[in-house]
Image: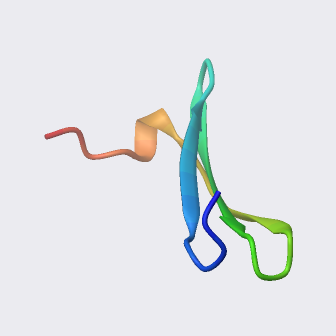
Amino acid sequence: METNRLHHWIVVLHCAYMEYTYTPWDGRNYYRRTVAYDHVVWC
């Protein structure tokens, strides 16, 4: 992985999804949110 690049991914679950961001400069994963599918506006 490159040193100063954010890495973002989405985990899709049965009834919701979670977003995470990895910041390599401090070696941490940051949890961003969990959204239930009934609150998602699908386009």
* Quadrant in the picture for residue 17: top right
Residue 34 rendering spot, x and y as whole percentages: 64, 51
* Quadrant in the picture for residue 21: bottom right
Coloration mode: rainbow
- The quarter of the image holding the C terminus is top left
Residue 19's place in the image compared with 22, above or below, is above
Q: Residue at x 55, y 72 (%)?
A: 5
- The quarter of the image holding the N terminus is bottom right
Residue 5 versus residue 36: which sits nearer the camera? 5
Residue 3's place in the image compared with 18, above or below, is below
Direction top: furthest residue = 14
Direction right: furthest residue = 27
Residue 42 versus residue 22: which sits nearer the camera? 22
Residue 31 rendering spot, x and y as whole percentages: 74, 62
Residue 22's place in the image compared with 41, above or below, is below
Q: Residue at x 66, y 74 (%)?
A: 3
Left or right: 19 as drawn, with respect to 27: left
Q: Residue at x 55, y 56 (%)?
A: 8
Residue 6 rendering spot, x and y as whole percentages: 57, 70
Residue 15 rendering spot, x and y as whole percentages: 59, 25
Direction left: furthest residue = 43
How many numbered tags mark residues here? 0
